Amino acid sequence: MEEKTDLAQILVRLDLFDKAREIYAELGRTAVLSYLKSSYRLLSKVYHPDLNKKNRSVAQKAQQDLNRLDHIMKNMADEDIIDVIKAGAITLAKEKIKILVVEDESGLQELFRDIFQMEGYDVEVAIDGYAGLEAYRRFAPDLVFTDIVMPKMNGLELIKKIREINPHVKVIYISGFFGIRGLKQELENEVSKYGYRTLSKPFRISKMLEKVKSYLEEESSEAGNFSFFA
């Protein structure tokens, strides 16, 4: 009984519990067991202390939880793990933060979606600017995490249209082409005026998560105080 309670508490602290219950309800026991095992492998890399030197203490605590999760799952029967998920003895009271990912590369769409979901965010993915605008109207996310160079409508054009709906939208621009002539100046103006954030590809997942978390925790964005390549 103590081990079941420990498992439930760890899943809550790692923001895996609600998603595990959702997967079990929709797809069954095999899918939720696979989710928990794959979450352990991915998050062990994300929270590795050597990759999070600035937040080493936080990473170490998460790593301890992950090690305990691995130990429990290896020593607990699958049916007992499922019982914990079904019982729902502990739930998260807070409403999930919503992130809209706009990215035209399918591999990155899946990667960002999976990582943000494992961190406890509610996520929707759009394949280009037009789809992103429709998703924004329907999903009303707390943060738009968007590529810049995309077909049909680029990220800068997308955010201009979203600002007509919500002038205070929070945005993180991602791209491997920040140096493109004509694009760099326009982006610098956006960052300076609205306080948006940027991430240059390639970037570490831990850096991405840290930037998202700190940005979302801010009460408001003060324009003019941000480095373009921060």
Image: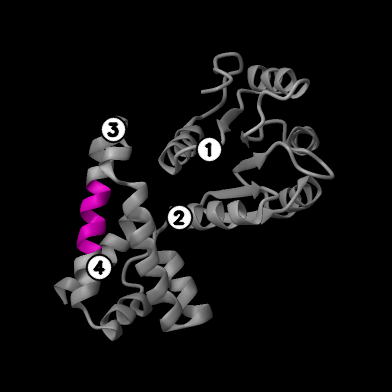
Q: Could you tell me which residue is drawn at 23 percent across and 47 percent down?
A: 61
What is the quadrant of residue 185 in the picture?
A: top right
Three-letter code, disc 2: Gly
Q: Which secondary structure dominates the residues rendered in magenta? A: helix
Query: From the viewer's perspective, is 107 left or right of 30?
Result: right
Q: Residues within 10 Å of mark 3 (few under 14, many from 20)?
A: few
Q: Residues within 10 Å of mark 4 (few under 14, many from 20)?
A: many
Disc 1, SS: loop
The alpha-carbon separation of the residues under discs 4 and 1 comes to: 35 Å
Q: Position of residue 173 (x, y in %)?
A: 63, 34
Earlier along the polypeptide chain: callout 4 or callout 3? 4
Queried whether the magenta region covers residue 66, the answer comes back as yes
Three-letter code, disc 3: Lys
Q: Which mark is residue 96?
A: none
User: Over which residues does the magenta segment extend?
Assistant: 61-69
Query: From the viewer's perspective, is 3 left or right of 114?
Result: left
Task: State the residue position of label 1.
Answer: 202
Q: Could you tell me which residue is drawn at 63 percent across and 48 percent down?
A: 101
Q: Which mark is residue 7?
A: 4
Earlier along the polypeptide chain: callout 3 or callout 2? 3
Marks 4 and 3 close (CB-CB < 8 Å):
no
Asked whether 109 or 89 is in front, the reply is 109
Disc 2, SS: loop
